[in-house]
Image (cartoon, rainbow, N blue to C red):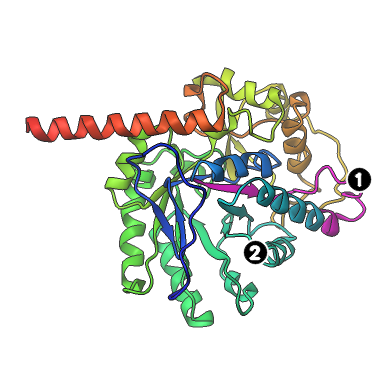
Amino acid sequence: MPGEPARSPEGQKQMSLFPELKIGNLIAKIPIIQGGMGVGVSLSGLASAVAKEGGIGVIAGAMIGMCEKDISSNYREANIRALKREIRKAREKTTGIIGVNIMVALNNFSDLVTTSIKEKVDIIFSGAGLPLDLPKYLHEGAQTKLVPIVSSGRAAKIICKKWLAKFNYLPDAFVVEGPKAGGHLGYKPEDIDAPECSLENTVPEVVQAVQPFESDNKKIPIIAAGGIFDGSDILKFLNMGAAGVQMGTRFVATHECDADIAFKEAMVNAEEKDLIIIKSPVGMPGRAINNAFLEDVKKGIRKPFTCPFHCIKTCDHTKSPYCIALALVNAKKGLLKHGFAFAGANAPRVKEIVSVHDLFETLKEEFRAAITRTSLRVAVA
């Protein structure tokens, strides 16, 4: 909002060529957002480590109360309690920028949004549907930024128009997620490999779509996501008009990631042939690492379950071959015989588990090298 004091995360000891990412009065020294990965893959541990490095750390809200003893009998309160705890734990570890990812498709969407705003989280990222009513949860004096996740310029334009007309509010940024992302994808199966749906095509489209809504007092930065792997990718999308990038898969293979070591090793050991597109019980395609659990599903073997959660609006549990929530909870806990890991298209390029700090240092070096190569090409030309 105009007139707000700027707030920066913890200072960086080492100089970086990265430009800052500004979302309203929030200033990230490194223009990297860590994707919100559920269930339980990115909680306070990973999010705070990323924020400490100058990026934006994100807690995944989906089924965040999975380890609460009363999750089955008291689903709503268990998730609210767990979300409060994770936000507060992250705040204890860092003064950096912390966000929460909340899917529109969640049945407890309003609970998670209201709780995040009450806890003064810096940013809410919201996708898996268009968050057309998200600004209604803001109360007077709330500083939480609202960032929808979209996969087209058309979706971005619809949200801008609806928010402006109904709430006199514009998105504080957009995350544009391409078809190379891990997890649930906002595309029809036949569009996942279509060139016109590539992130390279979509980012400039969204940049152009939001420009008419911008003014001197309101900038709407665009964040590129889905298939961003190294420093050269970051430079490429910054040069295409993005203000920053969102990365998920590469942060899974970090010591601070909140998933079990078996989950991380599944990512490190994944080969190209292991990545498949699944039809998720929630009605969307998703990219995952194939394993025995998913092979059984393909064979038509049902995984018996009861559904105490009813967590996703679009999931018909009476027809689902398995419970997506339980499968992802099991995977996060390392019980991959009873679940599976979502992963981005570049998962096979992940070769080792490192610290978040070392990953940021690597990305800085890759970015610096990419700038040097670009400069040399320009000089030669």
Residue 107: x and y, percent? 74, 60
Residue ID for mark 2: 120
Residue 366: x and y, percent? 35, 29
Residue ID for mark 1: 69
Residue 173: x and y, percent? 45, 61
Give the left or right position of residue 246, taking residue 72 as reference: left
What residue range appears in magenta? Answer: 55-78
Residue shown at 36% from the left, 74% from the top = 217
Q: CA distance from mark 2 to mark 1?
A: 26 Å
Tell me, yes or no, if residue 43 can be seen here.
Answer: no
Please identify the residue farthest to the left as the structure is shown: 381
Q: Is residue 243 above or below residue 253?
A: below
Residue shown at 81% from the left, 33% from the top = 303
- Callout 2: 10 Å neighbours few (<14), some, many (20+)? some
Comes first in the chain, label 2 or label 1:
1
- Front residue (pair 341, 81): 81
Secondary structure, mark 1, is: loop
- Front residue (pair 205, 68): 68
Residue type, label 1? Lys
Secondary structure, mark 2, is: loop
- Callout 1: 10 Å neighbours few (<14), some, many (20+)? few
The answer to if 196 sits in the magenta stretch is no
Tell me, yes or no, if residue 13 can be seen here.
Answer: yes
Q: Mark 2 vs mark 1: give the one in front.
A: 2
Give the left or right position of residue 67, taking residue 262 as reference: right
Residue type, label 2? Lys
Q: Is residue 25 above or below residue 254?
A: below
Residue shown at 70% from the left, 67% from the top = 118
Give the left or right position of residue 266, taking residue 352 as reference: right
Residue 207, disc: none
Chief secondary structure of the magenta span? loop
Residue 39: x and y, percent? 70, 42
